[in-house]
């Protein structure tokens, strides 16, 4: 019996019984599972290897985030170093250290 058939049978049973709580709860659970399976199937994640694929994608995404963070930190570090070097060169010229350099 497929999930759709089981859901139809539970719905008919609930109508016949006057809708007991247990039957309605079973309908809701089956409908939720059926909807989740359909959604996973539409996303292409209904095969047995989908869990492994998702774990690999999460790992790849984590590595990408770490790489972005490291690249941003490196850019900021270089910008600070260049700014400090420019300040030092400016101070050297202002204080007259340019005469120490042979033309």
Image: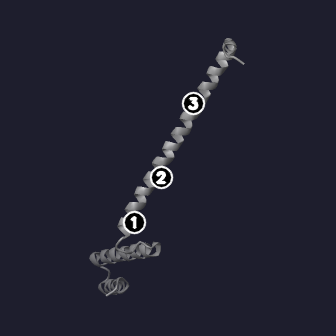
Report, in whole angstroms, how far the alpha carbon at label 2 lies from the one at label 3. 24 Å
Q: Is residue 96 above or below residue 84?
A: above
**Are there few (<14), some (14-19), or many (20+) residues within 10 Å of tag 1?**
few
Quadrant for the N terminus in the image: bottom left
Report, in whole angstroms, how far the alpha carbon at label 1 lies from the one at label 3. 41 Å
Image position, residue 92 (x, y; %) = 65, 16
Q: Is residue 9 above or below residue 51?
A: below
Q: Secondary structure at mark 1?
A: helix
Quarter occupied by residue 6: bottom left
> Along the line of sight, which residue is nearer the eye, 95 or 97?
97
Residue bearing the label numbered 2: 64
Q: Earlier in the sequence, mark 2 or mark 3?
A: 2
Residue bearing the label numbered 3: 80
Quadrant for the C terminus in the image: top right
Q: Residue at x 52, y 43 (%)?
A: 71
Residue bearing the label numbered 1: 53
**The furthest residue to the left:** 22
**Are there few (<14), some (14-19), or many (20+) residues within 10 Å of tag 3?**
few
Image position, residue 80 (x, y; %) = 57, 30
**Are there few (<14), some (14-19), or many (20+) residues within 10 Å of tag 2?**
few
Q: Residue at x 67, y 20 (%)?
A: 90
Q: Secondary structure at mark 2?
A: helix
Q: Secondary structure at mark 3?
A: helix
């Amino acid at each position: 019996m497929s999930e759709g058939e089981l859901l139809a049978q539970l719905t008919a049973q609930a109508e016949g019984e006057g809708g007991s709580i247990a039957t309605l709860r079973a309908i809701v659970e089956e409908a939720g599972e059926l909807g989740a399976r359909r959604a996973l199937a539409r996303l292409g994640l209904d095969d047995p290897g989908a869990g492994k694929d998702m774990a690999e994608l999460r790992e790849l995404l984590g590595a990408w985030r770490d790489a972005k963070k490291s690249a941003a930190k490196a850019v900021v570090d270089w910008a600070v170093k260049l700014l400090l070097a420019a300040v030092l060169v400016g101070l050297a010229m202002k204080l007259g250290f340019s005469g120490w350099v042979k033309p």
